[in-house]
Amino acid sequence: MSGPPAGFLEAHLRERRAAGAKLLVPYVTGGLGPRWIEVIEAMAAAGADAVEVGIPFSDPVMDGPTIQEASQRALDLGVTPTAVLDALPAVDAHVPLVAMTYYNIVYRAGHRRFAHALASNGVSGAIIPDVPLEELDPWARAAASEGVETVLLASPVTPDDRLAAICERSQGFVYAVSVMGITGERQSLATSAGVMAKRLKAHTDKPVLLGFGVSTPAHAVEACAEADGVIVASALMRLLLDGATPEQLGEKVAAFRAALDAG
């Protein structure tokens, strides 16, 4: 199997941004229900610029209750990292796929083997939130050798000198964490969100996408006053956990797309 072209994620997002679009990256937990591949396709058809695919892990330290529940339900169904990745070549989405998982899974597989599994199954990027900048090199080298772009995260308490280093090393886009804590739906967007995006934009021209707590189309529009785009996870996975169909997930993503396009 041949993977996506090297640099596809960042190039695609830059192209969309240059065309005037605010970027929309929804998340789906791999293996969550028998139709999760159709969920990815529905999200892409509804206007997603990329799709983040979570590889379930039993101790997701960054994730809040909704994503934890989604991961556990997928694990209870017998899903494995290999099963998630092996299913992705069947996806008919025509947008970049970004895998999100934790370092334990990467370490167990081996850096080169895991990077090769991502690339050969059509994954353009990887988010591994528990690998600090100081320990990034072994994974980053393996990922780069396979053309996989490693997306790094920055939080509101990250000092400016470290922000600059994160921006320099991040590939695909820079993941701006809107608020300290875990992922999850929130009633309002944190006041730190716009500040975080603005700080990152001062250090890089790479796409800056804001995540954590982007729960409604209105939140997405607010976030994009400073950020280039948003990542939406818990609000969508709550629908899937509650029995929503791929078509209904697509409708939800379309609502985010419409709001962003309207500004």
Image (cartoon, helix red, strand yellow):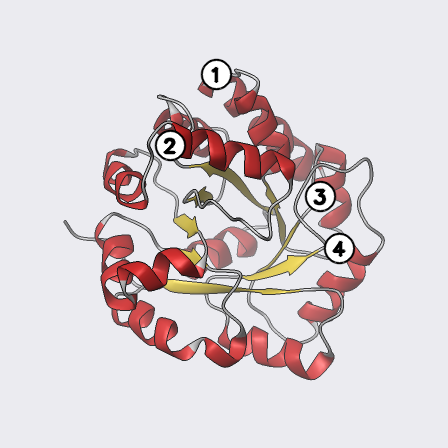
Which numbered tag is attached to residue 9?
none
| Sequence-earlier tag: 1 or 4 | 4
Mark 4 sits on what residue?
A: 179
Find disc 1 in the rendering and name its residue: 245
Q: Amino acid at mark 3?
A: Gly
Q: Is residue 168 above or below residue 45?
A: below
Q: What kind of element bears circle 3? A: loop
| Gap between marks 2 and 3 measured at Cα | 23 Å
Upstream in the sequence, badge 2 or badge 3?
Answer: 2
**Residue 219: x and y, percent?**
75, 40
Q: Is residue 135 shown left or right of residue 195?
A: left
The tag earlier along the polypeptide, 2 or 1, is 2
Q: Residues within 10 Å of mark 2 (few under 14, many from 20)?
A: many
Q: Which mark is residue 31?
A: 2
Report how far apart the C-alphas of labels 3 and 4 lie in the structure. 8 Å
- Mark with earlier residue (4, 2): 2
Quick check: 48 above or below 166? above
* CA gap, disc 4 and disc 2: 28 Å
Tell me if mark 4 has few (under 14), some (14-19) or many (20+) residues whose alpha carbon lies within 10 angstroms of its own. Answer: many
Q: Quadrant of residue 11?
A: bottom left
Q: Earlier in the sequence, mark 3 or mark 4?
A: 4
Q: Decide: marks 2, 3 in contact (CB < 8 A)?
A: no
Q: Is residue 184 left or right of residue 77?
A: right
Quadrant location of the C terminus? top right
Please provide percent x and percent y for residue 145. Answer: 26, 72
Callout 1 secondary element: loop
Amino acid type of disc 2? Gly
